[in-house]
């Protein structure tokens, strides 16, 4: 019986190869899209779960409740972790670490390592990284030692064993570091990515700031320990310590513990090791996956139903010859299952063939090794089996218990032109319209942040990072003067921080001299006198810095505020603060007289509110900004590098372009946009295939009607109108349903941004044009063929 059903299923699929191919391809594309989204979601949710005892690993987060808002930072001082470990029994172990970019000399070559960690000796005890060589129990137990990854060992020493060899940390100075061991390359699904780990004790000399909040702290809690209770104990210890040091805190502070598994998707705090993911965007992608699956399922059911209508006579003959309703149902289920299995296999093949394109387009960090895992196949297989069985069952039930005489009298009919088929088609178009609208809305919001609301001029700006050592201060001026002689270079400025980089220089306790202390948090930066003019930042009150001003030579100090800082001091108007002096109530000293207020300077991306910032004037800066005229960028870059090596001998030439650096903050938003673009195209393809299948069915079932109309004088235009009218109405109905849904979703998403665009009417008009155009092109192609066919030929076959 089973063999017979399988043979019959393949015969029917081959017999209706056109419609079956469209059906299988549409379902395969839908399942491929769902598989890709599920793989991405699974990867994002797997962050840091591979560590042993990951359920007990917690990160310390410092909460400070300023009047300007809650500041959450994972930067903690050197002391708090050690104190908590010693005094709280629920803590089994702890580790401090900080990530930095450092330079290392190996042989005669200098390497820049962006993923350098400095960590306590407990690092490899708490985090289970597989060791390739070396003795783990000895790792990082003394200063000037380092553990590296396999890839870095190969880059530095080829296939030699690196353990015991010495590399040199350079700029500033030249410090030898002995390699203690090698660990396997770090998985991409962790927030603790590194290529080397240097012992933290290498940094902790007399000049180290032990009270600065610049170190990440992790705890391994004992089994059964309550993280909330432990965090409260840490807060109490910290307050006791501050009181003993006679430090006055006028704003509430708290310590919280964050599970390491939650870091990637549920935090975006100061001093993060890397840009984290976005849990909300995973929810959006899950909704997209469901929409794609619904569209593919509706396409599958609609087309399978249309194929069934062509087989009523054959099914009737089988029932007349004694086949039971149950046998017919089993045949339908078998055929639907086989169609589904073929679609699933094709989905995996398509994903495998196209994955490299998807990986490059979406900037994915994972590979498809998981395709061979049972768990990867389980969910889509269950979904497809259920969909296929439901489809086969629903269609088979229509024949269950039907009297054979009904087929002889031709009373048994199945029509996909009824309300069910129309609803399914409207559903598919609704999905496509929602995705297209979402894509256009996301594109408008991102463009608004990057172009329209962003009024700083960061185009054609090359940023060179000079060595931090003071011995190079005088070389900076000579370097800049030489570069300005090149005709390709327009202007130069500098600062100690780059727009697009999170500012770590933040402080409370700042107020207007002679007034009460306010619990606000202010960021600070050092900039060149012409820094704001260079970036085209608008001065809205007072003056800019004079060319020879310097706040660090012991003379009068002047500062410029952004609008947010000026208003934070409680003046009625930002202009009223000009001439007032800022005072540090903690250090008991003047910060400087306010000489200007600027507006429109963005340190971070425009999805965040601008923070109150104080700008000091300096004559040096570690980041040198070079604006290039319309010239060969690579040629200019070569000249700049040559001069850099002349003035900063033996130092690593580090550079980037400011617009690329700043826009890297929009990575998660751009990735979401690309997903929407990709899956909108997928939805359009599925919908077009569905339309193609349905219009093929309509043309076949109405062949006789078309022939008679043409013989009676109907024109090609009238035939086209007759065939296209229904589908045009379906698109219009879907548009009416989808537009308010899309508007509501976009409105809720846009509200999460500090700088938000308006949801213009053209988004939805353009969406209608796209959906209408796709439907019209798809339907008209088949309709034209039917309308121009010889009517005599059509009637002959009928």
Image (cartoon, rainbow, N blue to C red):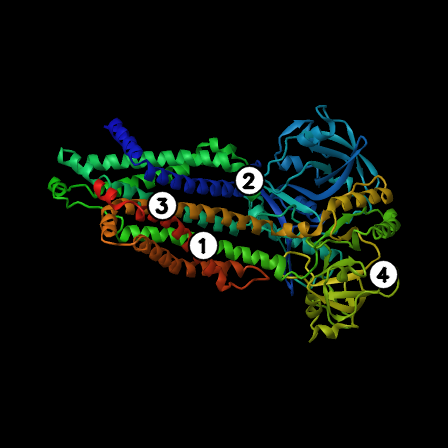
Crowding at dot 2, Cα within 10 Å, few <14 / some 14-19 / many 20+, comes out as some
Q: Mark 1 or mark 2, which has the lower sequence index?
A: 2
- Give the residue furthest to the top: 160
Residue 415 is left or right of residue 210, and the answer is left
Identify residue for label 4: 550
Q: Residues within 10 Å of mark 1 (few under 14, many from 20)?
A: some
Of tags 1 and 2, the one toward the viewer is 1
Could one spot residue 318 in this view of the protein? yes
The disc, 4 or 3, on the residue closer to the chain's N-terminal end is 4
Q: Position of residue 339 (x, y in %)?
A: 33, 36
Q: Residue at x 86, y 43 (%)?
A: 646
Of the two numbered discs 2 and 3 in the rendering, the one whose residue sits closer to the viewer: 3
Residue, disc 1: 770
Query: What distance separates the C-alpha of mark 2 from that of mark 3?
Result: 30 Å
Is label 2 in contact with label 4 (beta carbons under 8 Å)?
A: no
Res. 692 mark? 3
Q: Position of residue 84 (x, y in %)?
A: 66, 47
- Secondary structure beneath dot 1 equals helix
Measuring from the top left, give residue 344's x and y in whole percent.
Answer: 40, 36
Q: Nearer the viewer, residue 199 or 304?
A: 304
Secondary structure beneath disc 3? helix
The answer, for residue 246, to whether it is visible in the render is no
CB atoms at circles 4 and 3 under 8 Å apart? Answer: no
Question: Which quadrant, please, contains the C terminus?
Answer: top left
Earlier in the chain: of badge 2 and badge 4, it is 2
Q: Nearer the viewer, mark 4 or mark 3?
A: 3
Which residue matches tag 2?
359
Q: Are marks 2 and 3 in contact (CB under 8 Å)?
A: no
Among the two numbered marks 4 and 1 on one chain, the one whose residue lies closer to the N terminus:
4
Q: CA distance from mark 1 to mark 2?
A: 27 Å
Hey, which quadrant is residue 120 in on the image? top right
């Amino acid at each position: 019986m089973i063999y017979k059903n399988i043979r019959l299923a393949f015969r029917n699929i081959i017999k209706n190869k056109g419609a079956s191919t469209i059906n299988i391809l549409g379902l395969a594309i839908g399942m491929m899209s769902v598989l890709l989204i599920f793989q991405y979601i699974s990867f994002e949710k797997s962050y840091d779960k591979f560590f042993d005892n990951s359920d007990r690993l917690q990160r310390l987060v410092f909460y400070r409740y300023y009047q300007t808002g809650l500041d959450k930072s994972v930067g903690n001082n050197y002391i708090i972790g050690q104190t908590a470990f010693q005094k709280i029994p629920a803590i089994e172990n702890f580790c401090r670490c900080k990530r930095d970019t450092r330079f290392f000399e190996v042989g005669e070559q200098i390497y820049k390592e962006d993923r350098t960690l400095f960590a306590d000796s407990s690092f490899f005890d708490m985090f289970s990284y597989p060791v390739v060589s070396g003795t783990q129990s000895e790792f990082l137990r003394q200063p000037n030692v380092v553990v590296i990854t396999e890839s870095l060992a190969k880059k530095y020493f080829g296939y030699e064993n690196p353990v015991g060899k010495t590399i040199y940390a350079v700029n500033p100075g030249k410090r030898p570091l002995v390699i203690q061991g090698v660990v396997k390359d770090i998985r991409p699904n962790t927030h603790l990515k590194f290529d080397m780990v240097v012992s933290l004790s290498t940094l902790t000399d007399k000049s180290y700031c032990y009270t600065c909040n610049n170190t990440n702290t992790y705890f391994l809690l004992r089994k059964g320990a309550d993280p909330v209770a432990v965090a409260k104990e840490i807060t109490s210890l910290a307050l006791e310590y501050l009181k003993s040091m006679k430090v006055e805190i006028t704003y509430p502070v708290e310590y919280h513990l964050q599970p390491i598994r939650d870091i990637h998707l549920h935090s975006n705090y100061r001093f993060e090791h890397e840009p984290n993911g976005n849990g909300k965007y995973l929810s959006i992608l899950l909704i997209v996956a469901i929409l794609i699956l619904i569209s593919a399922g509706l396409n599958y059911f609609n087309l399978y139903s249309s194929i069934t209508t062509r087989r009523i006579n054959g099914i009737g003959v089988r029932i007349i010859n004694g086949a039971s309703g149950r046998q017919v149902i089993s045949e339908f289920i078998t055929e639907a299952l086989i169609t589904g299995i073929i679609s699933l296999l094709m989905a995996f093949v398509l994903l495998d063939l196209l994955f490299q394109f998807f990986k490059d387009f979406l900037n994915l960090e994972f590979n498809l090794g998981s395709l061979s895992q049972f768990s990867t196949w389980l969910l889509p297989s269950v979904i497809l089996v259920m969909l296929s069985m439901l489809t086969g069952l629903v269609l088979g039930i229509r024949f269950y218990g039907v009297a054979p005489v009904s087929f002889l009298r031709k009373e048994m009919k199945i029509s996909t032109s009824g309300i069910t088929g129309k609803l399914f088609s409207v559903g598919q178009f609704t999905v496509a319209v929602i995705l297209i609208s979402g894509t256009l809305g996301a594109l408008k919001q991102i463009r608004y942040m990057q172009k329209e609301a962003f009024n700083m001029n960061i185009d054609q700006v090359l940023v060179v990072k000079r060595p931090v050592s003071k011995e190079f201060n005088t070389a900076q001026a000579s370097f800049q003067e030489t570069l300005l002689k090149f005709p390709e270079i327009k202007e130069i400025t500098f600062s100690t921080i780059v727009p697009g980089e999170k500012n770590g220089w933040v402080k409370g306790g700042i107020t207007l001299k002679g007034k009460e202390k306010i619990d606000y948090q202010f960021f600070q930066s050092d900039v060149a006198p012409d820094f704001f003019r260079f970036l085209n930042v608008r001065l809205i009150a007072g003056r800019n810095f004079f060319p020879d001003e310097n706040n660090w030579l012991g003379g009068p100090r002047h500062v410029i505020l952004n609008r947010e800082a000026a208003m934070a001091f409680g003046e009625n108007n930002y202009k009223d603060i000009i001439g007032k002096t800022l005072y540090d109530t903690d250090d008991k000293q003047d910060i400087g007289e306010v000489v200007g207020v600027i507006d429109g300077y963005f340190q971070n991306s425009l999805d965040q509110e601008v923070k109150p910032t104080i700008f000091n004037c300096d004559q040096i800066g570690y980041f040198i900004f070079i604006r290039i005229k319309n010239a060969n960028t690579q040629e200019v870059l070569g000249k700049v590098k040559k001069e850099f090596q002349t003035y900063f001998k033996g130092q690593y030439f580090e550079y980037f372009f400011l617009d690329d650096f700043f826009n890297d903050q929009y990575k998660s938003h751009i990735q979401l946009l690309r997903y929407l673009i990709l899956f909108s195209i997928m939805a359009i393809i599925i919908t077009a295939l569905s339309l193609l299948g349905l219009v093929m069915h309509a043309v076949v079932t109405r062949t006789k009607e078309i022939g008679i109309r043409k013989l009676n004088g109907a024109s090609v235009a009238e035939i086209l109108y007759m065939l296209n009218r229904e589908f045009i109405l379906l698109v219009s109905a879907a548009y009416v349903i989808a537009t308010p849904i899309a508007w509501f979703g976009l409105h809720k998403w846009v509200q999460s941004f500090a700088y938000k665009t308006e949801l213009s009417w053209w988004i939805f008009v353009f969406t209608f044009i796209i959906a209408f155009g796709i439907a019209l092109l798809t339907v008209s192609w088949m309709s034209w063929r039917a309308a121009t066919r010889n009517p005599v030929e059509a009637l002959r076959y009928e």
